[in-house]
Amino acid sequence: MSVTLGSDDKVHVRLLMRPFSQGHEFLWERANGREPSEWKYYEQFARTNLRVLLGTDDFSIVGRHADRSAKFFNGTWGIGARVIEAEARMSSLVTGDSNSGGRVLKLVDFWRTRGVGYIDFTEMNVDDGLEIKSVRVDPSSANPPAMRSGKQLQWTNTSLATTFATAYVTFD
């Protein structure tokens, strides 16, 4: 999953999915790169889980496609995914933070909330004009993201014990 904060007051979410578990990789290889016959199942999954991830119903699905070259992490790296893209107004999602003076975006791991797993890979980017100042994760024992720069964070999760349930990203 990729979340991009835009200087145009938009949050863009790119949710990558695969219809088969890791144990059925041969089925994915056959379906990789083809548009599914029914996008409604992917969109339903995205709508349900984006509500939890962003904490709002105020978003729109703006795109969907099969991307044969997308990097996809499910315990190990592979190629190809079904992609749903959504947008929300940043001003309706962020809150002020009196401690740092910045704005805070809260992200919730929708898999972990239901107790069925965790998001394997999360990437957060900010456009020019914005900078990531800090990140706080709950539980506090969770691995913090790798800060690639003031513009990018990445979490690669391989264990429920080390993944975040909620992340608070302060930016300005």
Image (cartoon, rainbow, N blue to C red):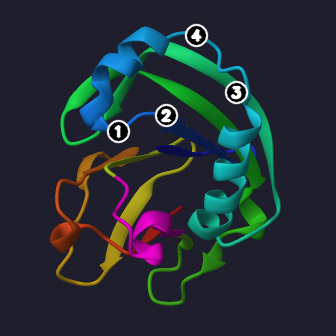
Q: Identify the secondary structure beneath mark 4.
A: loop
Residue 21's label in the rendered image is 1
Q: Give the range drawn in magenta.
A: 107-119
Relative to 23, 44 lies left or right: right
In this view, the residue in front, 9 or 21, is 21
Residue 30 in picture, x, y percent from top left: 42, 10
Residue 159 in picture, x, y percent from top left: 17, 62
Was residue 114 drawn as part of the magenta stretch in this picture?
yes
Q: Which amino acid does label 4 sit on?
A: Arg
Q: Which amino acid does label 1 sit on?
A: Ser
Mark 1 or 4, which is nearer the eye?
A: 1
In this view, the residue in front, 65 or 148, is 65
Give the Cα separation between the discs numbered 4 and 2: 12 Å
Which residue does the numbered mark 4 point to in the structure image?
Answer: 34
| Above or below, 116 relative to 146 | below
Residue 19's label in the rendered image is 2
Give the Cα separation between the discs numbered 2 and 3: 14 Å
Going from N to C along the chain, the mark reached first, 1 or 3, is 1
| Above or below, 167 relative to 139 | above
Residue 20 in picture, x, y percent from top left: 41, 34
